[in-house]
Amino acid sequence: MRLQVKGKNVELSPALKEYAQKKLGKLEKHLNDSARVELELASERNPSIGQSEVAEATVFTKGPVLRARESSHDMKASIDLLVDKLERQAQRLREKRRRGHGRNYEHGAETAPAGGESPVIVKTKQFAVKPMGAEEAVLQLELIGHDFFVFQNAETNDVNVLYRRRDGNYGLIEPQVS
């Protein structure tokens, strides 16, 4: 497992890097040797933020990408919380690979009702979209714990959105350009 540590408003001392290396080493038993981990440690400079020490990691595996973010008053505590979260995700991934997939996925789209107020974009996020099948996208969605997942469909090369429905099943949005 390869580890890259970056810092933002944080002095990356050798002791802190060594601590992160030791803690993230726990993931090796769940991941293969080709896994790559990017760890970003940041200190928020806003005095109104109580838990200002942030640890954020992205784990690139042969299959799904694991992501986690934790914050606390102490950087080492943030790293500990982050490793616990990533370890749970890695265990879930390993168990799902062992069990296999026996689910049927529903293909369809639902539209959300429009609200009375004008929504405001408060955050913009960019990420790499890699080609994958719908089943792998479901696995990714479950691992990151979000309500939706954007991916490039390996069969059609179109960008699709997979989302969790209220009934516990999944919906797949396949845009069509007119």
Image: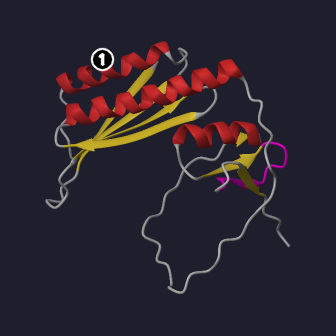
Q: Amino acid at mark 1?
A: Lys
The image position of residue 56, as x and y in percent, is 36, 40
Q: Is residue 52 above or below residue 15?
A: below
The image position of residue 96, as x and y in percent, is 64, 25
The residue identified by callout 1 is 22
Residue at 29% across, 25% down:
20
Q: Is residue 19 above or below residue 143?
A: above
Q: Is residue 1 left or right of residue 111?
A: left
- Residue most toward the bottom? 116
| Element type at mark 1 | helix
Residue at 56% across, 81% down:
115
From the viewer's side, name the closer residue of 130 and 114.
Answer: 114
The image position of residue 104, as x and y in percent, is 80, 40
Residue at 56% across, 35% down:
65
- Residue most toward the left? 47
Q: How many marks?
A: 1
Q: Is residue 74 left or right of residue 164?
A: left
Q: Is residue 20 left or right of residue 171?
A: left
Residue at 49% across, 31% down:
59
Q: Is residue 104 above or below residue 61?
A: below
Residue 118 lies within the magenta run:
no
Q: Which residues are magenta?
A: 154-165
Q: Is residue 97 above or below residue 157?
A: above
- Mark 1 burial class by Cα count in 10 Å: few <14, some 14-19, many 20+: few
Q: Is residue 57 left or right of residue 100?
A: left
Quadrant where the C terminus lies? bottom right
From the viewer's side, name the closer residue of 13 and 84.
Answer: 84
Residue 162 lies within the magenta run:
yes
From the viewer's side, name the closer residue of 34 and 101.
Answer: 101
The image position of residue 113, as x and y in percent, is 64, 77
